Image (tube, rainbow, N blue to C red):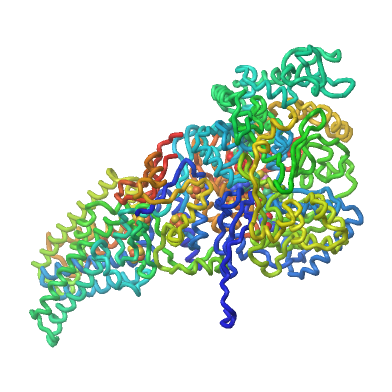
Amino acid sequence: MRRGMVIDLRRCTGCYGCQISCKAEHGTPPGVLFARVLKREEGRYPSMRLLFLPVLCNHCAEPPCVEACPTGASFKWEDGIVDIDQDKCVGCRSCMMACPYANRYLNDSPQNYFEQGATPFEAARTARHQTDVVMKCNFCRDRVRAGKPPACVANCPTAARTFGDLDDPASEVSRLIQERGGFPLHPEAGTRPSVFYLPP
Amino acid sequence: MQTTRAKYERLIGDLRTELRPQREWCEGRGLFLVIGHFVVGVAAGTWLFALLFESRAGLAAAFGLAALGGLAHLAFLGRPGRFWRMAAHWRTSWISRGFVGLALFLAGAALYLVALFAPGAPWAAGSWLAQTGYAAALAGMLVLMVYMGFVYTASKGVPFWTSPLHPALYIAYALRGGVAALAVALALGAASSATMEGLLLAWSGVTAAVIALFALEVHGALTGGNAAARRSVHELLAGRVALYFYCGTLALGILVPAWLAWQGLSGQLSLAALAALGLASALGDFFMKYATIRAGVLLPVWTPMAPQR
Amino acid sequence: MNDLATPIRDDAWIPSSCALCYGSCSILAHRVDGVVVKVEGNPQSVVGKGRLCGKGAGGIMTHYDPNRLKTPLRRTNPKKGLDEDPRWKEITWDDALEEIAARLRRIRAEDSRKLVMQRTTTVTASRLPMQTFAAAFGTPNLSTAGGGLHCGNGAHLLSGIMHASWSVVPDFEYCNYAIYFGASKGHGAGHASASNMGLAAEARARGMKLVVVDPMCNFASAKASEWVPLRVGTDGALALAMCNTMANELGIYDAAYLQAKTNAPYLIGPDKLYVRDPASGKPLVWDKAAGAARPYTDARPADTALEGELEANGVRCQPAFQKLKDHLRRFSPEWGEAISTVPATTIRRLAREFAREARIGSTIVVEGVTLPYRPVAAIAFRGAQGHKNSVYNFLAIELLNQLVGAADVVGSCLGFNPACGGFPETGRPRYVPSAGPDGLMTVGMWMGYHYPYPIAEPRMPRNLGLQDLFAMGMTSPFLDSDDREQMWSRFELGYRPEMMLNFGANLLMSIANRETVARSLAAYEFMVSIDLFETETTRFADIVLPDCSYLQTLDSRSNFPFIFSLPAGMGEWCWPIRQPVLAPEGGQRRFQDVLLELAERIGMRADLNAAYNASMNLAPEFRLQGERRYTFEEICDAELKSNFGPGRGLDWFKEHGLVKWPKRPEEVYWRPFVDVRVPVYWEFMVPLAEKIDALTAPRGLKLPREYYEPLPDFLPCASHDCKAPGFDLTAFYYRDSIHTNSFTMENPWLDEAARLDPFSYTIAINADTATKKGLADGALVRVETESGRSVEGRVRLTQAIHPEGLGIAACAGHWGDGMPVAKGKGVFFNGLLDLDWEHVSPVNLNLDLCARVRVTPVEARR
Ligand SMILES: Nc1nc2c(c(=O)[nH]1)N[C@H]1C(S)=C(S)[C@@H](COP(=O)(O)OP(=O)(O)OC[C@H]3O[C@@H](n4cnc5c(=O)[nH]c(N)nc54)[C@H](O)[C@@H]3O)O[C@H]1N2
Ligand SMILES: Nc1nc2c(c(=O)[nH]1)N[C@H]1C(S)=C(S)[C@@H](COP(=O)(O)OP(=O)(O)OC[C@H]3O[C@@H](n4cnc5c(=O)[nH]c(N)nc54)[C@H](O)[C@@H]3O)O[C@H]1N2
Ligand code: SF4
Ligand code: SF4
Ligand code: SF4
Ligand code: SF4
Ligand code: SF4
Ligand SMILES: [Mo]
């Protein structure tokens, strides 16, 4: 089994629902963005177009971040999810330099969103994260193991995101990649991402 | 709180840019990594040249530097208390290998040096323990020289660093650092002019290699590299870190010592000048590493998508 | 934790509703040990379909914002102004309410109209309690601040007259070709925004073509098959040229629809009025079968003439459609190009595509019912609306739909659920459009001050907003405008406002320039603000009352009326509630309870009960009785039981969150089933103008008659006529997907996203235009109008905008300390807007939102 995600760029409206629902799901501290939405324009006026590109950890089949990690804190589960064991991480940031997708964040000092300190939500959720270690998207492993789709997938208002097993040729994700010509980001990096995009 | 806020603001600023600078390995605590890498590299080179030139002071200096480098690395880590875990993944991780190399070097060098410097030690020079130490230190030294370049080459997120020349360059740095450190050590111990001349020649040779490798690397980044690599070169030559590069690396690290070396080869070099050469060269190397690391720009996430409606 | 207490872990998912924007999507709030740790969409619900936009997903941070108000505050500084510190002191609820009640009692005794009730559009559920209180109190002076002035006066009016609805959308499930004129529907904002995003994405996946006419390629344009940039405010010209191409160049129109469902066959005399049957007074049509003019009710629609020169009642006349066709001839695509900058070839092509794709005459079977199939829709909203000529803009755009019969049939332009047969078990709530005077459609359900049609008789104003004089106006500028006193005295208004009861609206930011609005706020003798935050507007209040957030409050309907946030098209009807997930903190109190308490204290409980009976349309057995004191829970319970039966009261809804039942094709595609006509010729404008002018002209205000013609024209905004050198750009604003008006800038998650966004907090300018002006990306500029109003901000150079446009996102640029996260973020566009008679539509009173500006680098000024 290799868990993967397909993001349909034709559907995506750049609403930031994924970025924010991920924040809510994981209580990530300021500046830590497991999911992000990028915007860029291609072409020239008037035949230009504005594009939205939601990004997250690609859960690469050959993850350079795991390779670079000296402690084994970064590792890959048997289902393909690339994860971080906070208890093992020394905070050397090698994985951040190894990831060609800038998807890792150092949680370097305890931070809250408001000057006044932690909100009850942050006290309950953000405080669970260790500081001085590296964090990233874990494909919502707890949800997935409980049989639920990742938060960003369940929430996406345009149903642009599909989650499933890339190893299963009959799965929805495999079918979409096949039929719509799904492509990963930076294939040249040789990382074999498990997040694919469908052309806009 | 204030610095946290400032960091956050900067991160937001960085994330808004297409070509985002890496800051983890050079700013804040990250500076200790540059220092650590630099010092450990010098230590390895020094050990090598100290063996070649049979300098006891050089060996001692190498050990001291390596220990210092280790401390710098600890200061760099987010969770230094867990440093021992870094040995775990030497099979894949160059950082891990470096850690093992450093450990090997420190342990080996300690064994060897104790016998060398303390005649009353439980084991004598030439004993199997000292021999083992010698071998371990040599192995550690080799690892230290080699691993660093690979750490950068493995940093796929920063295209400027991933040049295949990087390992060779870092080996050359280590050697240059070794010559420089030895020069200082020898100067302090009043070296003979023959040794001095050998050292100056070695310095010139290694420096030439460094310059050649560096030029090739920059050329590669500019021509074959992507936007991020080109931006890094820009940062280095005309951007945020250009000052360090020109003043630190070029002027201090190449021109000043080159002039001194030329003086020395064509005439007589004072010990003070030799020490100055060593220091200048080493500092130049530090700035070189600092500048190259700080010039690191992350690969943009965006892939151009054919405008098809 | 108390060790002795049984450790019962609180872990609940509670169904409720979002209120981060007026979309009111259904949510499930996950509460663990008294803390809400997640808000997700409620997949059971039709509203949002279990999926939330970024704002909704981030609502927790708005709720838990430590900057929220927690205690009632009393101002101690009597002076009010932008630079005045109110010097708040905390007071008890009892003191606060008694002081307010004393004021209210006195005002009600003197002249209840002196009370102005104002609310934010953002919380739609607030409409019912506020409106009910106003009705009971006896004030007609209700306002929604910038709402309406900016977004709805044109849109709601047109949708009301033509679709019996508050607004329109394409029938996403079946539409094949939609053309948007300045609307984000389904892409970034608008009604039912998260639900529509899902529907629009499905439509895209299915292959629906979407053409977006917009000066900026922002949200809808980004997803469009074609982006058609145009000069700001010229939609009317483009649409008229398209109508002309269709009606005259191509000759494509749905005659059968026009004959049966519009006033196109009504005969128009030389006085621009209907030629009427002398006996019945009914408008005449020409019956081709009978070869004679007959009342419209007597001829078979198919026999009525749409064209020709005729004579009836002894006058020369023409069918309205002939008038329209002839009228359209002057709007050639070349003329359209000169005004809008859209190439004439493009205009012709768009018209051709629209007309062809309409498949006039075709039918389709939906759930066993054979229905007309017109899979095209012309849609407009805030973009086409924010101009002095909004009525004609909208009418011209709507004519595209009317010409091809694409109105409330399969695949076409749909109203938002204007016909509902009710919950099967109770037949409630039920509303259906019906035929009014002259056979023209009146709405079955409405939400505004007055029904759009029939048009009310203009009269000397009794309302502060003068909407009873300018009878097509909705929200009015005259509550705050620079010339309001002149207008009031000119029209002999017998009283002046004295007290404002404000719920949420941050009008200092949301209407126009802040100096003008500040003057009007400072003029209130007494102002009460019920809010979550100490907003810029709240700082003008005498008493501030801390409200409960959406996670702490109760609403028997999470929006108003219940269809406001319900997606159009087939699917299900859905009535969700909002219920408290968390207790109030500190002194926070639900405003609904506060209003009940105030009614109690001023002795108008019976009036309030009666008003609730009316506004909730309670069934007899659930009506509130006489003087009895009810809690808001009881009132909600009554409404729910009244609509859904005694078994489905508040308790049932608290458990289930919502009730839903399937929509029937006859409800969604009601048009063929309801015998009503809509006006393609606005005959009523002629007498209306006469009547208004008869009141205004003698008092020194000549009504600009060109705005009151029965057929649309393109009338330029002030920005189009500006010839001052250097003022070469037209600034406009647009909704940011990640922000709701001025509200959400305080939410740090949304703020973070917006800061990462290239456009949210910047001023979008065409890159070539900027280069010509020597502006680099990120340059700090000053944007200045001819009248000297100005704002500052950083430019974002982009290809995504018309060379003459200047796009500013959202309603940003907070300056107050009450919302510290929001402070200083983005650009306060409204600082450029003037607020007076000159800048509003003389028909429907909406504000002109396009500002002709000059842009200069800030450094150069120094
Ligand atoms: N520049 C610019 N101007 C605009 C717009 C724009 O997009 N850009 N939009 C225009 C339009 S169409 C409209 S409708 C108006 C909207 O203008 P407003 O009605 O003023 O809406 P908001 O800016 O959302 O401000 C609502 C305020 O209500 C308060 N609030 C939110 N939730 C609650 C609650 O549950 N209870 C209470 N008591 N208070 C609450 C918050 O403090 C919030 O700041 O603005 C108009 N003006
Ligand atoms: N995310 C989000 N959703 C919201 C709101 C919000 O603030 N944020 N507010 C809610 C409210 S109160 C309202 S009224 C609705 C409004 O919803 P929309 O009508 O979608 O509002 P806007 O985005 O302001 O305007 C639509 C488009 O008009 C364009 N435009 C501006 N001027 C012109 C013009 O002259 N001609 C044309 N053709 N286009 C023009 C803008 O670039 C923009 O793309 O959204 C509601 N939903
Ligand atoms: S939630 Fe879905 S539509 Fe919204 S930005 Fe993310 S992927 Fe795009
Ligand atoms: S995207 Fe980056 S962090 Fe994620 S698996 Fe790939 S290399 Fe590792
Ligand atoms: S920071 Fe942590 S996860 Fe990353 S490489 Fe170092 S130890 Fe591994
Ligand atoms: S999969 Fe989960 S962790 Fe990853 S981006 Fe989506 S919500 Fe965040
Ligand atoms: S569209 Fe509005 S109501 Fe729906 S989730 Fe977003 S903010 Fe909440
Ligand atoms: Mo609005």
Q: Residue at x 70, y 48 (%)?
A: C562
Residue A65's quadrant in the figure? bottom left
Taking B115 as reference, is C622 left or right?
right
Q: Residue at x 39, y 39 (%)?
A: A179
Residue C224 on image: x %, y %:
52, 36
Viewer-nearest residue: C754 or C407: C407
Mark count: 0
Q: Is residue C552 above or below residue C202?
A: below
The answer to whether residue C730 is seen in the rendering is no
Taking C752 as reference, is C304 left or right?
right
The answer to whether residue C599 is seen in the rendering is yes
Residue B228 on image: x %, y %:
35, 48
Q: Which quarter of the rendered picture does the N terminus of chain C lie within?
A: bottom right
Taking B254 as reference, is C415 left or right?
right
Q: Is residue C522 above or below residue B39?
A: above
Viewer-nearest residue: C627 or C196: C627
Viewer-nearest residue: C306 or B179: C306
Q: Is residue C284 above or below residue A96?
A: above
Residue C301 on image: x %, y %:
74, 21
Residue C150 on image: x %, y %:
69, 42
Residue B48's quadrant in the figure? bottom left
* Residue found farthest to the right: C110
* Residue found farthest to the bottom: B120
Q: Residue at x 53, y 48 (%)?
A: A157
